[in-house]
Image (tube, helix red, strand yellow):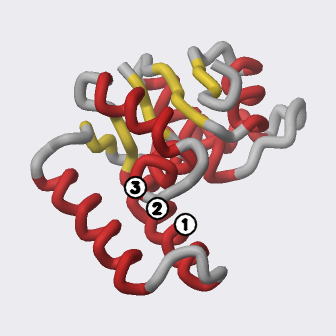
Amino acid sequence: MYYLDTSVLAAYYCPEPLSEKVEKLVISADRPCISSLSEVELASAISRKIRENNLSPEDGNKIFNQFQTHLKETFFRLISVDDRHYQTAKNWILQFAIPLKTLDALHLTVTAEGDLTLLTSDRQLYISAKYFGIEAVNVLIE
């Protein structure tokens, strides 16, 4: 089962070069997983696209409303981020072995603890997943 990171989630909802490829992968997945963190990060990604004039505020609202509808209709399996995820993320970061960002570490711990496959277009997140032995697919290369 796939865990979608925000790079994939944004490409699914917002027009991007990867959107068509991502849409096929997401639609073919059986109830892909996201975390409560993904909801906030998608809002941030949409906001950034609006500020950079890549998306109108109206389209941004439509996109986020569609995402909210998908959540309500349980298109996604929503996983809560809790204390155990934060503790594992902290421990992985404190290994000092790779450049692991806080939010990426949280996405990875949710993926690992759920025994899921990470679906990402983020090169460093993909490398980090492989480092920690997490099954991952980089949509840019696969």
Report the mark closest to the observer, 2 or 3. 3
* Left or right: 115 as drawn, with respect to 94: left
Cβ atoms at labels 1 and 3 below 8 Å apart: no
Q: Which residue is mark 3?
A: 13
| First-in-chain label (2 vs 3) | 3
From the viewer's side, name the closer residue of 90 and 16: 16
The residue lying furthest to the right in this view is 97
Q: From mark 2 to mark 3, how far is it between C-alphas?
A: 9 Å
Q: Position of residue 35 (x, y in %)?
A: 39, 46
**Relative height, residue 80 to residue 123 (above, below):** below
From the viewer's side, name the closer residue of 106 and 41: 41
Q: In the image, what residue occupies the spot 75% across and 35% down?
A: 123
- Given the image, on which type of amino acid does mark 1 rest? Ala
Q: Position of residue 39 (x, y in %)?
A: 39, 59
**Relative height, residue 46 to residue 133 (above, below):** below
Q: Secondary structure at mark 1?
A: helix
| Quarter where residue 74 is shown | top left
Q: Secondary structure at mark 2?
A: helix
Screen quadrant of the N terminus: top left
Cβ atoms at labels 2 and 1 below 8 Å apart: yes
| Quarter where residue 28 is shown | top left
Which mark, by number, is residue 45? 1
Q: In the image, what residue occupies the spot 49% across and 58% down?
A: 15
Q: In the image, what residue occupies the spot 24% across and 30% down?
A: 31
From the viewer's side, name the closer residue of 36 and 95: 36
- Given the image, on which type of amino acid does mark 3 rest? Tyr
Cβ atoms at labels 2 and 3 below 8 Å apart: yes
Which mark, by number, is residue 42? 2
